[in-house]
Amino acid sequence: MQQQIITYIETELLAGQENLNLTADEDLLTTGLIDSLGTMKLIAFLEETYDITVPAEDMTIEYFMTVNDMAEYIAARRTANVIS
């Protein structure tokens, strides 16, 4: 999952930038790698790809700062959907 998210970020959100070697624990937001529009595109990608819904109250930095944070969030949303 992490590699798929990294690939999306590198090819769709950071296209044209050279020498990108994103890691799953790299801070994407506070470093400015991804801006607010990029974050919204990323959330749309995650919702479509992983069949989840991200409610407005979950659109916070803590869930989307790193790829690892996103993977943990997706896993939690999937678990919550199964339990519901």
Image (tube, rainbow, N blue to C red):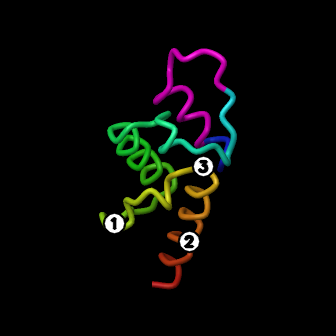
> Where is mark 1, residue-wise?
55
Look at the numbered discs 3 and 2 and tell me whether their residues touch, using CB distance below 8 Å: no
Query: Callout 2: helix, strand or loop?
Result: helix
Which image quadrant: the C terminus? bottom left
Instruction: Determine which quarter of the picture holds residue 76.
Output: bottom right
In the image, residue 16 lies in the stretch drawn in magenta:
yes
Going by the picture, which residue comes out furthest to the bottom?
Answer: 83
Q: Amino acid at mark 3?
A: Val
Across and down, in percent, residue 28 comes to 53, 42
Q: Earlier in the sequence, mark 2 or mark 1?
A: 1
In the image, residue 17 lies in the stretch drawn in magenta:
yes
Q: Which mark is residue 76?
A: 2
Say above or below: 57 vs 13: below
In the image, 26: left or right of 34?
Answer: right
Q: Residue at x 40, y 60 (%)?
A: 60
Q: Which residues are magenta?
A: 5-20
Q: Amino acid at mark 1?
A: Pro
Separation of disc 3 and disc 2 at Cα?
14 Å
Which label lies toward us, 3 or 1?
3
In this view, the residue in front, 17 or 49, is 17
> Where is mark 3, residue-wise?
67
Q: Residue at x 64, y 43 (%)?
A: 26
Look at the numbered discs 2 and 1 and tell me whether their residues touch, using CB distance below 8 Å: no
Separation of disc 2 and disc 1 at Cα?
13 Å
Q: Residue at x 50, y 20 (%)?
A: 15
